[in-house]
Amino acid sequence: MKFADVIVDISAQQLDRKFQYRIPTMLEQNIRPGVQVEAPFGKGNRTVVGYVIRVTDKPDYELEKMKFIQGISQKKQSLEGRLIELASWIRENYGCTMLQALKTVLPVRQKNGRRTNRTIVLKLSKEEAARILEEEKRRSHTARVRLLEYLIDDGSVDYAACLKELNLSATVVRALERMGVLFVEDESDFLSPFQEHKREMPFPELTEEQGRAVDEIREEWRGDAPRPVLLHGVTGSGKTVVYMSLISAMLEQGRQVILLVPEIALTYQNVQRFCECFGKDVAIIHSRLSQGERAEQFGRAARGEARIMIGPRSALFAPFPSLGLIIVDEEQESSYHSEMTPRYHARETAVERARLEGARVLFGSATPSMESRYRCETGEYREVRMSRRFGSRGLARVKITDMREELRKGNRSMLGGELRRSLAECLERGEQAMLFLNRRGYAGFVSCRTCGYVVKCPHCDVSMTIHKHGRLVCHYCGHETTAFHSCPSCGSPYIGGFRAGTQQVEELLLREFPQARVLRMDMDTTRHKNDHEKLLRAFGEGRADILVGTQMIVKGHDFPMVTLVGALAADLSLYTGDYRGAERTFQLLTQAVGRAGRADRPGVAVIQTYHPEHYAIQAAARQDDDIFYEEELGYRRLMGYPPVENLLAIHASSADELRLNTAMEYLKRYLFRATGREKVQIIGPADEAVSKVKDMYRKVIYIKHRTYGTLTRLKDKTEQYVEINNGFRGIYIQYDFNA
């Protein structure tokens, strides 16, 4: 006999209130998570419609006390049902409880009221209103007179401001409203960071290459089994215009669209263009909205007031009843991978939601992820290329500065000679420059500034990380060694970790170029709401000559006057103790180079590095991702890393270090038994890159195998093992795939 857990009330407060029913034998084949069922409820056994969230063969209650499901609801599967089915898929593929998956996927519902802007609008002509004004003066209705005089002059006025400034009560407004003199217009307060951009503009015309890309994408989607499409276009090729064309066509069909972006604040220019083009059809969410504001945006989608949802990965769960298209812009970005349970990836989850909704999926990037390129190669995705910049503008010229040579010449500054000269020339021409410090990941690797040698793990081919106790540690297998005081390769004493920040770069620039106006954009200068937009807008309006920042300044921005981009310390993301280091470095440098020369003026980019011969640096300088892909894929194939093979990480944390160490050793032994005859590689347990956070110790076990299904089965067995063993109490477990 099988049993179904059913939820009746779909709201954030009631998701954990599930009721278990017995499944009649004749319905067993048709009951699955997401299915709407009719079941008796309460003492009166009234029939209610609920949603199945789990099917099990283990009852939670005595059989005599459990009721039977009456049948499957004849209504068409609802949006909630499809989202619950998606939550079940997330629970199975990423490892979490069903409740955690449901709270991730289902729309936020808040009991607080909608925040609205209210405007008092004159309904009559000015001549008719003037006649009523004279009548109200004769009757000595002074409050009505004040309001009418104001409306005759301006036509409309903000409700709250009017009542305060004119010293009026709501009764006065209601009286004139009943007379048909005015009306009160309510409008939800949405798009707060972009509200001033809410105006319509003509749809941009497609170039020949953009038109060809649109045609190829539509051709794929007309087939019997349409695949996700990867739009692979160089920086500045106009992918946004292609998105707009496809969105417009989808809206004409009465369907809705989700557009995922890495972070709204860092791509505000593109978001502004969508707002200008599609008007109030656009709803926006981002990380700095309050829960109430987020709920309002999702509410607009559910009520049909918005047909396009733009936002980071959580926008993927917008409650659209007739979803037609999901676009994932800059699909290679790591922010699409959740670091909280469930640790889902928006790219794969978008494909699954599209399957459930009968929608299409488009990925866009100038530097696609290895996974997407590999799936195009295997035929799982279709690739559509755009190889020319909009308006036939050329790509920036790239120069590589070998910082080892700079050191030999006696230059210990963060600015190499080439970059210093280029900055002086740029400022002299009255143009703008962007300097970014590549601080992605931890700057804990150890390198030699004389020869460029980096200390790597002999077992995992990733860089080792220096810890406070002075030892070098590999965070994949746990291998340790003592720190070096001189370079093992050349004997130089200049070996250690890199120490530099954006503030030091800003101070250096102000000393070297005192006439330059410098803006700094990092976590310290963008603490408050809308700080990103204010800084980028100031730079775009020419109120600064040089913009200094971390990788956040090189994501999708389009500044016509920027003709120089400088990449400081390009190696910092190359050696992060992570097998994706080369991929992330190539993507970041290519995106950075693409910020220069986007208008009529030619662009120059300077990459400063201690490893100019590295294939990621060379490929980025040539802006050739085909060369990089082939080199990197060979490395991944040799080491058995994704996308060639699959990787499951089991993260564990506990306040009790001894208990955690013991539990992870037992878990490793169990995994060796559970794999059976499968050729599975198990690595660890090892300390996490940050081994202790807020008094919680952290460890990880990695498991490699060619097939994803084998890893999900191991994850399921591990969940069962942890659940039945008391030794894992007080230990928090997370599962992460291909991270």
Image (spheres, grey):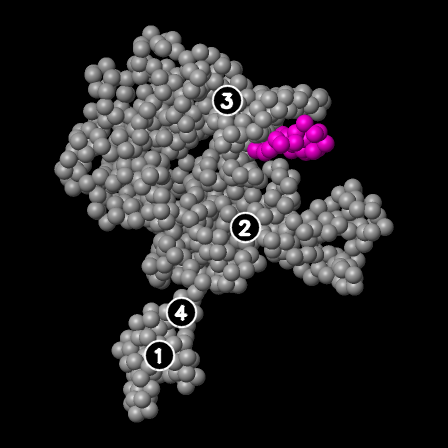
The residue carrying mark 3 is 475
Of the numbered discs 3 and 2, the one sitting upstream in the chain is 2
Residue 472 position by quadrant? top left
Q: Secondary structure at mark 1?
A: strand
> From the viewer's perspective, is 713 left or right of 2?
left
Residue 66 versus residue 697 in the image, above or below: below
Residue neighbourhood size for the residue with mark 4, other residues' Cα within 10 Å, grouped as few (<14), some (14–19), many (≥20): some
Residue neighbourhood size for the residue with mark 3, other residues' Cα within 10 Å, grouped as few (<14), some (14–19), many (≥20): many
Distance from the alpha carbon under mark 3 to that under mark 2: 34 Å
Q: Are marks 4 and 2 in contact (CB under 8 Å)?
A: no
The residue carrying mark 4 is 118
Which of pointers 1 and 2 indicates the residue nearer the eye?
A: 1
Which of pointers 4 and 3 indicates the residue nearer the eye?
A: 4
The residue carrying mark 1 is 122
Of the numbered discs 1 and 3, the one sitting upstream in the chain is 1
Distance from the alpha carbon under mark 1 to that under mark 4: 13 Å
**Most foreground residue, 725 or 397:** 725
Magenta stretch? 707-736
Task: Look at label 4 and name its amino acid.
Answer: Arg
Of the numbered discs 4 and 3, the one sitting upstream in the chain is 4
